[in-house]
Structures are given as structure tokens and as C-alpha cells.
Image (spheres, grey):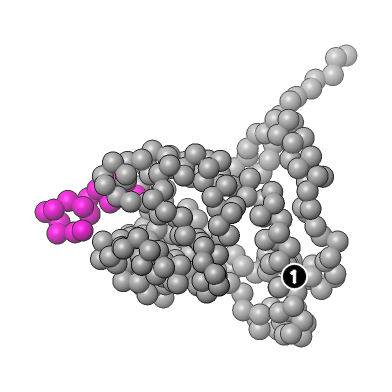
Amino acid sequence: MSKQTTDEILVGRGDRILTHSFDVLRRHLEDQQHSRSPRLSFMTGEHHRVRDFAVAELPRFGRALPPEHIAERTGLRLDRVGAILDDLEREFRASYDEVGWQRTQACERAASTLGGLSSLGVRNFVVTNKPKAPTEKILARLRLDGFCSGVVCRDSVSPPLASKSDVVRHTMQKFALLGSETLVVGDSVDDARAAQACGMRFVAMSQGYGGAHCQSEAPVAAVCAALSELLPLVATWRQPSRGEP
């Protein structure tokens, strides 16, 4: 009897089943083997307790978990929770900066949407809390850097900017942007707050994981379920008869 073989594996991703070739899996494992990631040897039982709790609690909580909440629910001292969160963030960022950024995928029709906005005379900027080096690598790898008039990150200046609002404000100053003529597009509450603080309208992306489309802390001008919906929305807003910028 002949033995059937396959050159694909199935990977669950949310409510979807994706197929990947064994070559992709092999390259991924080689990347893991020859990099510092995953670097889990530093993690104690308490690290795992905090991480496992956060993973389970975040979907229900819907926003960043306060250290006090984690301490109360895990039974750990508040100062210990703070130290563990610092450890986890440091190791995650080291892993992301080295190889994690390579796993970033573009939204569907990202290039055509950004190109369409450019053809309308709209300038596109990337404003993010991610470090500048991996952000620029991501844009270049996805071939989206050519659509961007600027990339501003928290570490674009020294000392680093303290918040997303500061990053947006710095972008306004650097590129002479007017709040009344600028949109912030994002999926997090921080994005919505930054838009409000800088006098900009905010478009919430419901396809993201930040929950900005269902928060009430900051105003939302529109909600898009996909990035491609942004192009007709902006085109409509720019019509002179609407009186919009």
C-alpha cells in the first residue's frame, strides 16, 4: 500500500484555517533556532501566571490590564507584577525587533488603497508606538514605504515621545499638518484619544484588535471594517459640496 504524503500543513488563525507549505514551516523553525526567539528561559512560574492570566483576561477586559487588577487576581504583590510586566515587555520587544516584525502582514488591498489616497492628493503617514527600525523594515518588506510621506515613531526623537498623542502632535509639527484637515486611522483607544487631543477626526478600524470602534472615551467619526473602505470615505468627505476638508 502506498503512503500518501502532503506538502502542506493547516494552521488555525481565529475562525479561519490557513494552509502553509512545509518550506514555510522549515524556514520559520530555522529562524527560531538561529535567533534569540523564543527566549523563555527567563520566565519563572510567576511570569507564566501573569502572562497566562493576561492572555485569558484581555479579550474580556477589552483594554490594557491595570497592574493592580493583575495583582489582585493573581495573588502577587503589586511591585512584583510591575517587575514581571517590565520583563515580559523587554523580552517581547527584543524578539519583535529581531525576527517578529517579519511576520507582519499587510491589510487586504493596502497598496491600492494607499495609492488611491495619494492620487486624491492625500498624504499618508505612519504614526506608531513601534520602534522606528522594525517599522521601516516592515514597510519596505511589504512594499508600502513608497506610499508614505513620513514615518513617525516614539523613538524618532530623543528622548522618546511619551505617548501616542505626543507622536501625533510631533507629526503635526514636523509636517505642518492642520488638525481640521487630518484624519487619524487606527484600532486602539490610544489612537482615538490621540486624535481627540490633536483636534483630528478619528476613523476606527473594526478589523483590528484594539476595540476603538466600540469605545466611548473619544469621538469616532466613522468605522471601517476593512482598510479598502477608507478610500471612498475620504473621497466623499473631500467633495466640496459637503463642506469637508
Observer able to see residue 192: no
Q: Is residue 193 above or below residue 31?
A: below
Q: Residue at x 70, y 34 (%)?
A: 24
Looking at this view, is 156 or 33 the one in front?
Answer: 156
Q: Which residue is mark 1?
A: 87
Secondary element at image label 1: helix
Q: Position of residue 111 (x, y in %)?
A: 42, 39
Looking at this view, is 137 or 51 the one in front?
Answer: 137
Q: Is residue 175 above or below residue 226?
A: below
Magenta stretch: includes residue 237:
yes
Looking at this view, is 152 or 86 the one in front?
Answer: 152
Q: Residue at x 28, y 41 (%)?
A: 119
Would residue 60 be found to the left or right of residue 224 on screen?
right
Observer able to see residue 149: yes
Looking at this view, is 74 or 129 the one in front?
Answer: 129
Would residue 28 be found to the left or right of residue 148 on screen?
right
- Indicate the quadrant containing the C terminus: top left, top right, bottom left or bottom right: bottom left
Number of residues whose C-alpha sits closer than 10 Å to that of mark 1, classed few (under 14), some (14–19) or many (20 or more): some
Q: Magenta segment, principal secondary structure?
A: helix
Q: Is residue 126 above or below residue 162?
A: above
Q: Position of residue 55 (x, y in %)?
A: 68, 64
Residue at the right extreme, as displayed: 1
- Indicate the quadrant containing the N terminus: top left, top right, bottom left or bottom right: top right
The residue segment tinted magenta is: 230-245
- Amino acid tagged 1: Asp
Q: Position of residue 234 (x, y in %)?
A: 28, 51
**Residue 19: quadrant of the picture:** top right
